[in-house]
Image (cartoon, rainbow, N blue to C red):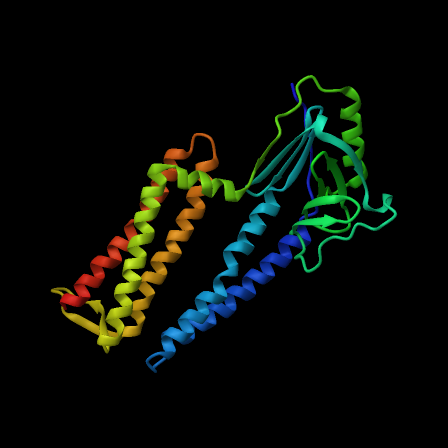
Amino acid sequence: MDERIEHRPVRSSGIVAHFILILLNAGVSGYLLFLAFTAQVRGVFILYLIAGILTLLPAPFLLYQVYALIRAKYMISRNGISIQWGLRTEDIPISEIEWIRLPRDFVNTVTPPPFRLPGAILANVTDRDLGAIEYIAANKETLVLVATRLKIFVLSPGNQQAFINDFHRYAELGSFTPIQKQSSMPQLILTQLTGDKTARLLLGISFTLSLIMLIAVSFMIPNLSTVPLGLEAGLDIQQSSPAERLILLPVLSLLVFFIDLIYGAYLYRKQGFKNAAYIVFFSSLILPISFLILLIIIILL
């Protein structure tokens, strides 16, 4: 049995920092969207809407960083070191590890990459003396360097000395079956999705329908002054709204598409959840089809 000892990075400061940025991001974006909905001048609505959407773009990245930090852990066993950081996994066989040291053990200080958020020191750099270095760390105070034949991994276990002691203890015991070297990144998951015919078909149709809707709305807006906002029984027009608000349909459709893509990709990589991922991908068709039907009704009215 391969007994593992789990070490986790210090996460509290990183999670707090990311949530503050998420709240600020959502607040600014929400205010811009509010201005868009209350704008009375044609054209100003679209400007506020685009600004609100662009401001919201960093939010999914920040949310993923929080998710990655919550799941982050380094596992040591007799067979090697396993790293998990969100959707990123890295298995390093014990035979590939050459040494483990602290930054202060070097004559020339190992400096972390600048301008990194707390809880997300993630970067690939090249050091003049050490060569290729990959940071998979949460903070700069507890860094540990793990050297392999190809590059050095910089980790940040909560207790540096305990991490090093556990590694040396297991290394002295020896390994009969070193873990298989492997690396899994989010980019590789997207590559797998594009190679899956069913996933590619469902996602391709959903994205294409949203683009068709965006193009159609772009041609409709200049030719319409108002559009029906709601209907009463018998399809009587209840009230109208500026035609610029039609742009919300393709925008919402694309937003839901990316949400389904991310959640479906998460399910796709989990063993036994591939069919559930297909269901999520199929659900991404519902909104663009519904909105296209709505556009047809608006044109006929």
The residue positioned farthest toward the right in the image shown: 107
The residue positioned farthest toward the left in the image shown: 234
Task: Pinpoint residue 137: horizontal percent, then vertical percent.
Answer: 68, 47
Question: Which residue is rendered at x = 31% and y = 57% of the image?
Answer: 210
In the rendered image, the quadrant that contains the N terminus is: top right
Please say if 16 is above or below 2. Answer: below
Question: Which residue is rendered at x = 38% and y = 37% of the image?
Answer: 196
Question: Which residue is rendered at x = 45% and y = 47% of the image?
Answer: 262
Quarter of the view holding residue 213: bottom left
Task: Pinpoint residue 38: horizontal percent, then vertical percent.
Answer: 37, 77
Quarter of the view holding residue 161: top right
Task: Pinpoint residue 231: horizontal percent, then vertical percent.
Answer: 19, 67
In the image: residue 16, left or right of residue 202? right
Please say if 73 is above or below 114. Answer: above
In the rendered image, the quadrant that contains the C terminus is: bottom left
Question: Which residue is rendered at x = 41% and y = 75% of the image?
Answer: 47
Total label count? 0
The residue positioned farthest toward the bottom in the image shown: 41
Task: Pinpoint residue 60: horizontal percent, then vertical percent.
Answer: 50, 55
In the image: residue 66, left or right of residue 281? right
